[in-house]
Image: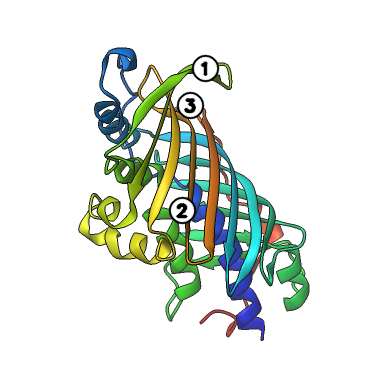
């Protein structure tokens, strides 16, 4: 039972990670003149420039429904950096998907060779005396649950999402708008999931296909600033009773972030037998 409940807590957290993590490294993006470039070319340039992002902050709201699993919402925010080492700090304020609830929210920090998880409900179930639980990425044995979280984060990073969007055959500019005080051009369109998945590197395609299995065509809106980077991204799709609506707000590209592991005296180890 503990294994199952831990899995559910991680699954809810993974939903937020899956929709929000950005991977990549490089230098600051250079401006592009989005007003004088075809919409499809803007998407291609945006997909390239997201791979150059070294840090960012994102706020995300994901609404999901499934004919068997029910409906719910995941809402949270995340800090990300790729240098000097890969690190992220995710706070899930609310996560309630069908029977998978996360009362009290959650926080996940990836730092160094460990993932630190702070889930009040999980701690109560385990009788933990420390607010944080540490799961080393290099520990021996089967650690599928943690691997799934990290795999989700990598499979649905911003670079991957913007690359998938380039499969759109009907993207168009729908005007200029301010997002978070930044002038942007708003683009709207659709893309077929299978064609979009094929835009990804081979090692990412299967995970992407599995996570979008219930969807056939996705409608998207993306707001791109003059530096070629998105400030807002929304996606929605439905298929056979399942539905996904996600809105992501990005800021702080390539700005310094401060992601630290929790204080040692606040961290306990995950008891043996709680992860499959």
Element class at badge 1: strand
The residue lying at 72 percent from left, 77 percent from top is: 126
Q: Nearer the viewer, residue 226 or 216?
A: 216
- Disc 1 or disc 2, which is closer to the eye? 1
Q: Position of residue 264 (x, y in %)?
A: 65, 57
Query: In this image, 89 relative to 121: left or right?
Result: left
Of the 4 image quadrants, the one containing the N terminus is bottom right
Q: Quadrant of residue 273?
A: bottom right
Q: Position of residue 213 (x, y in %)?
A: 40, 65
The residue lying at 29 percent from left, 55 percent from top is: 197
Q: Assess disc 3: are there few (<14), some (14-19) or many (≥20) residues with their C-alpha within 10 Å of its C-alpha.
A: few
Residue 248 visible in the displayed image: yes
Q: How many marks?
A: 3
Q: Nearer the viewer, residue 113 or 257?
A: 257
Which badge, 1 or 2, is on the more N-terminal residue? 2
- The answer for how far apart the CA atoms under marks 1 and 2 are is 34 Å
Q: Which mark is residue 182?
A: 1
**Are the residues tagged 3 and 1 within 8 Å (C-beta)?**
no
Which badge, 3 or 2, is on the more N-terminal residue? 2
Query: In this image, 87 relative to 29: left or right?
Result: right
Element class at badge 2: loop
The residue lying at 33 percent from left, 55 percent from top is: 193
**Are the residues tagged 1 and 2 within 8 Å (C-beta)?**
no
The residue lying at 39 percent from left, 38 percent from top is: 83
- The answer for how far apart the CA atoms under marks 3 and 2 are is 20 Å
Q: Assess disc 2: are there few (<14), some (14-19) or many (≥20) residues with their C-alpha within 10 Å of its C-alpha.
A: few
Q: Where does label 2 land, which residue?
A: 112
Q: Quadrant of residue 12?
A: bottom right
Q: Position of residue 2 (x, y in %)?
A: 66, 82
Q: Where does label 3 land, which residue?
A: 255
Which badge, 3 or 1, is on the more N-terminal residue? 1
Query: In this image, 43 relative to 92: left or right?
Result: left
């Amino acid at each position: 039972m503990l294994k199952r409940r831990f899995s559910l807590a991680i699954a809810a957290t993974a939903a937020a990670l899956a929709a929000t993590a950005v991977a990549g490294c490089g230098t600051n993006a250079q401006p592009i003149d989005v007003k004088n470039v075809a919409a499809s070319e803007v998407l291609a340039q945006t997909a390239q420039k997201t791979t150059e992002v070294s840090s960012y902050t994102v706020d995300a709201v994901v609404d999901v429904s499934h004919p068997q699993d029910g409906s719910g919402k995941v809402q949270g925010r995340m800090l990300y950096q790729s240098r000097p080492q890969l690190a992220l700090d995710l706070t899930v304020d609310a996560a309630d998907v069908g029977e998978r609830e996360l009362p009290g929210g959650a926080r996940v920090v990836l730092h160094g060779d460990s993932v630190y998880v702070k889930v009040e409900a999980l701690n109560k179930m385990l009788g933990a005396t420390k607010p944080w639980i540490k799961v080393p990425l290099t520990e021996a044995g089967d650690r599928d649950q943690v691997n799934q979280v990290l795999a989700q984060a990598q499979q649905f990073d911003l670079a991957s999402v913007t690359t998938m969007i380039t499969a759109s055959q009907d993207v168009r500019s729908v005007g200029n708008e301010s997002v978070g005080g930044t002038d942007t051009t708003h683009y709207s369109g659709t893309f077929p999931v299978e064609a979009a998945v094929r835009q990804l590197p081979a090692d990412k395609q299967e995970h992407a296909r599995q996570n979008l299995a219930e969807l056939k065509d996705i409608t998207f809106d993306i707001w791109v600033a003059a530096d070629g980077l998105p400030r807002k991204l929304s996606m929605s799709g439905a298929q056979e009773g399942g539905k996904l609506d996600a809105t992501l707000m990005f800021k702080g590209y390539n700005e310094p972030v401060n992601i630290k592991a929790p204080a040692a005296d606040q961290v306990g180890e995950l008891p043996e037998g709680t992860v499959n």
